[in-house]
Image (spheres, grey):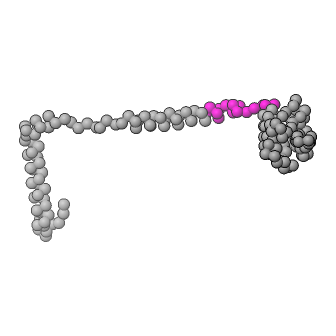
Amino acid sequence: MCACYTDAGVFCEKCAEITANEKFVSTQTEQLDEEANPELDALLSTQPTPQAAPSSSSGGGWRMSIILVVSVVIYAILYVNLNPNLFTMDAETRARLAARDRLEDCRLVFEEIGTHLENGDMPDPSLRCAESFIPNIITRDNDSIRISHPNPDTYGFSEIYVTNETHEPIFVE
């Protein structure tokens, strides 16, 4: 509302008209509120009251699933942190596992040598086990070729070899 006053201390024409309109609207609203309209009351009482639409249960299910997964992860992290010896091994177990891994690596090398022999090729002399600094021993007997490990006792065996007849690594204790 404009607060413009004339020199006589009265609202200007525009402000006087706005003020009169506001007074008219407020009196009409009060009269309507005071008068009870029975038809409108009856109509409002028979109309069902609007209710919130039911929420889908899948939305709540997803939230609960996410909360459950996060809770399990947090619990697992705390459990591992509170039990530091959970994944530690003693020196003997570590040494046994390392020896097993070295033997498996050597077996894979001799398996590759066997594949070369199976294809009728001679394997590269640099193809040998990691702990062996000596080249593999190659022996020929007529058509038979045998490639042996130079130090099989490193792995606890008396012989480790492969032939062109078997193609599979052989470990003799």
Residue 172 drawn at (x, y percent): 87, 31
Q: Residue at x 29, y 38 (%)?
A: 53
Task: Classify the position of the C terminus by image quarter.
Answer: top right
Q: Nearer the viewer, residue 108 or 75?
A: 108
Q: Main secondary structure of the magenta part?
A: helix
In which quadrant of the rendered view does residue 5 lie? bottom left
Picture mark count: 0
Q: Residue at x 40, y 38 (%)?
A: 59
Q: What's drawn in magenta, residue-wise?
A: 78-94
- Judge from the rendering whether residue 112 lies leftward or rightward of residue 73; answer left or right: right
- Judge from the rendering whether residue 66 lies leftward or rightward of residue 171; answer left or right: left
Q: Nearer the viewer, residue 88 or 118?
A: 118
> Does 157 sit above or below residue 126?
above
Residue 52 drawn at (x, y percent): 28, 37
Q: Residue at x 19, y 60 (%)?
A: 1
Q: Is residue 87 magenta?
A: yes
Residue 17 drawn at (x, y percent): 10, 62
Q: Nearer the viewer, residue 154 or 59?
A: 154
